[in-house]
Amino acid sequence: MDRPTAQESLAPAPINTSLTRRQFLCRSTGICATAAVWAAGARIPVSLAASPAEGPDQIGVLVDLTRCIGCRACVRACDAQNHLPHSEPPKTVWQGSAETLSFNRWTMVNLEGEASGGRPVPVKQQCLHCLDPACVSVCPVGAMRRLPSGAVVYRADRCIGCRYCMLACPFGIPKFEWSASTAPTIGKCQFCAQQAVFSGPACAAACPTGTLKFGSRPQLLFEAKARVHSRPDRYVGHIYGEHEAGGTAWMYLSGTPFDQLGFAKVPERSLPSFTRMALEIIPWIVTVLAVVLSAASYCIPGRKQAAEKMP
Ligand code: SF4
Ligand code: SF4
Ligand code: SF4
């Protein structure tokens, strides 16, 4: 083979502007992937990236546990309002029967606190109607939905029985109808939102002691802070639900620390916000990868070109 002359060695190599089919496919795939991911990312903010803001119309209930006498009138009112069938009428908490939430038991009042050596306290339990509900964010068919008022409601006609809402709820509220062999559904408090004319939850209306106060969440929060401030001897300095899981529509006041009453310790940040964060960085990761791979395909010669250059 002839050796190149010194002049030929110093001359710049001719630029090959033609693309092989392989290079064309690599580069166009990178560009298309980048465009597709950015297009998908642009749609994310509508449903996932924006956390629902709390407006003045956001409804809520303030539960003052220091006022509860454990009569369970709220439980009976919930059964009647929602036509929930039960074989036995619920008793008061002092008669010693404890019941947990179930598919057709959307609220319950049980005595809590004895296990930790404290004074027993009647505690009402139901869905807390999170401001940024995890059950809604994981439901693949929109069977769990947060209404503009703030009520988180369940639609049985959409449910496919996947039970993701049960796994996602940080408070363990949704319950599955295990006994049903066909079309089992989820049961949970609906905030009485299905009433034709909504005038507040039936349980709050039935409470004889003012333990349950229905109203606008911002106003209830203001009132809760005022109660805690004016009676530090009566209340622990914590409003459960103000920040838990990103904030909830149902908020609690208590004279006993909440961890002694079996209240779940949950992060202040809502669980869906972690998912949103992951979704927001995915377009960046894929874009960087696409750019790096496209640049590599420009710089690294294709197999055909390399073979042509071989002696
Ligand atoms: S408490 Fe659970 S079921 Fe109720 S809205 Fe929050 S995540 Fe959903
Ligand atoms: S708000 Fe309505 S559905 Fe929820 S616990 Fe009270 S009565 Fe039952
Ligand atoms: S009706 Fe009121 S006082 Fe009676 S158990 Fe329910 S929350 Fe407590």
Image (tube, rainbow, N blue to C red):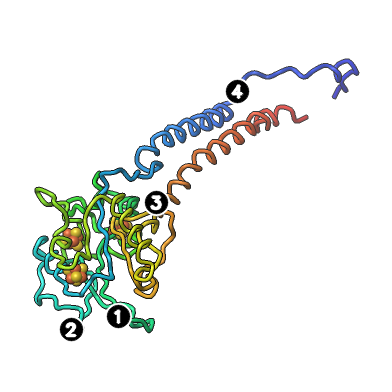
Q: Real-space Cα distance between discs 2 and 1?
A: 13 Å
> Element under label 2?
helix
* Image coords of residue 154 (percent x, y): 21, 54
Left/right of residue 126 with respect to residue 88 in the rendered view: right
Left/right of residue 208 with respect to residue 18 in the rendered view: left
* Amino acid found under the numbered disc labelled 3: Pro
Q: Earlier in the sequence, mark 4 or mark 3?
A: 4
> Element under label 1?
loop
Residue, far front: 230
Residue 95: which numbered mark, if any?
2
Mark 4 or mark 1, whichever is nearer to me: 1
* Image coords of residue 303 (percent x, y): 65, 33
* Amino acid found under the numbered disc labelled 1: Pro
Q: Real-space Cα distance between discs 2 and 4?
A: 84 Å
Q: Which residue is mark 1?
A: 120
> Element under label 4?
loop
The residue lying toward the viewer, choosing from 185 and 268, is 268
Residue 272: which numbered mark, if any?
3
Residue 26 sits above or below residue 187 on the image = above
Residue at 33 percent across and 45 percent down: it is: 54
